[in-house]
Image (cartoon, rainbow, N blue to C red):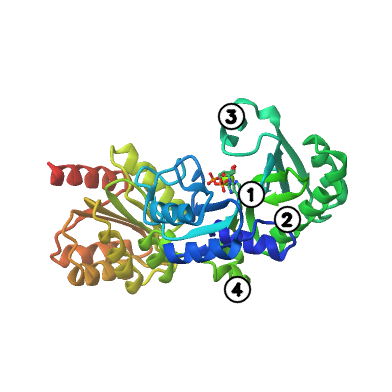
Amino acid sequence: MNIHEFQAKQLFSRYGIPVPRGRRADSVEEAVAIANELASSVTVVKAQIHAGGRGKAGGVKLAKSRDHVEALAREILGKTLVTPQTGPQGKVVKKLLIEEGVSIGHEFYLSLVVDRASASIAVVASREGGMEIEEVAAKHPEKIIKVFIDPTIGYQPFHGRRVAFALGLPKDVVNAFVKLLGSLYSLFMAKDASLVEINPLVLTTDQKFVALDGKMNFDDNGLFRQEDVRAFRDLDEEEPLETKAAEHNLNYVKLDGTIGCMVNGAGLAMATMDVVKLAGGEPANFLDVGGGATKETVKEAFGILLADPHVRGVFVNIFGGIVRCERIAGGIIDATREVRVGVPLVVRLDGTNADEGKRMLAASGLDLDVADTMWQGAQRIVALAQKGRA
Ligand code: ADP
Ligand code: MG
């Protein structure tokens, strides 16, 4: 799960990591009221979307007067920001962060991330922080510092000093940095984060550290015990079909193609997407109805697949293990009577009671194709979907 910058900054604050004074605004009036409260010489108006790269896309702007704040808030609220992280369709700005302008001495990059390869928490840092960090990482990887923290030992001041010296920090701010990184590590562990990133971490002209930006990702499997993190969830920022699928315990990820896939088990779902591509098609989604799929799950899954207007054909690929194929067949028959499918449907059933399932489908009189193998099924659905479009 992702959260907004203003929410990450609330967490930073609770853990003693300095952030600029500021608050979230949902309207132009609120933005102006906050600017009045802050009464700072420079006020920063920042788009809050779940994507980075806002600065370059015109989503972060500095104002020198209250009138200017009003004009900028009016300009940015409701605007569609397109950044390298939003995809070409962009994201509509629905919230702002209004904060005081900070007098920047130097911009550093600092992040913590779960590093699976070394089974540790990696501290990633650079002197070349700011909006060009991706380019620095690509062209000058030697400018990116990495220090690994073994989670069974935890953060120790020497980790902090190692990063501080590699960053070339002035001597009199090293202790402050060691403390800041320790706080960041505590926050990361306490909240089951998978990433926390401060870009830029600023050393101000009067030699104080301030987190000017904040990004956090959390491990979804830890959310059950992170009530305060769950409260940060913003459905405006999520794919509505994915939210609906999650409510029914379906693992659904929307993709850009036209072949809707309904599969049981993540491994078979991956294999199905591969085989659809091999047959010349593009999957419209990843959908795993799970090992314990019932008639109801199948019905919900059809509803979600068909709600995507790009779907030109549906391929149901089930391997009956714990799931019995005749139940899936029953679910398909029920679902296609209730939900108008309207696009070609190919079903491949194998495993427990597959023959019974196929017999039921054949006897149902429904307009669908039954395939004997996964490869035949994939070729068939791709051909039918293409014909439908022509
Ligand atoms: P993004 O990473 O999405 O582009 P940032 O929050 O990092 O957005 O802002 C982009 C740039 O704007 C920063 O690198 C910094 O130079 C400047 N900036 C952001 N917030 C402030 C602030 N409160 N005061 C001064 N400059 C700021
Ligand atoms: Mg940033």
- Identify the mark at residue 227; answer none if there is no mark: 4
* Tag 3 residue: 138
**Residue 184 badge:** 2
Which one is earlier in the sequence, the residue at label 3 or at label 4? 3
Asked if marks 1 and 3 touch (Cβ < 8 Å), the reply is no
Q: How much space separates mark 3 and mark 2, taking CA atoms?
A: 26 Å
| Image x and y of residue 310, in percent | 25, 51
Residue 183, horizontal then vertical, whole percent: 76, 58
| 230 up-or-down from 313: above or below | below
Measure the alpha-carbon separation of dots 3 and 4: 37 Å
Report the amino acid beneath label 3. Ala
Element type at mark 4? helix
Element assignment for label 2: helix
The residue that disc 1 covers is 197
Label 1–label 2 contact, CB within 8 A:
no
Closer to us: 84 or 72: 72
Say which element carries label 1. Answer: strand
Percent position of residue 381, x then y = 23, 47
Q: Residues within 10 Å of mark 2 (few under 14, many from 20)?
A: many
Q: Earlier in the sequence, mark 3 or mark 2?
A: 3
Residue 212's tag is none
Q: Is residue 203 above or below residue 349?
A: above
Residue type at numbered disc 1? Glu
Identify the image quadrant of the C terminus.
top left
Q: Earlier in the sequence, mark 4 or mark 2?
A: 2
Label 1 vs label 2: CA separation? 10 Å
CA–CA distance between discs 1 and 3? Answer: 18 Å
Q: Amino acid at mark 2?
A: Leu
Which residue is painted at 58% across and 50% down in the image? 42
93, 368: nearer the viewer: 93
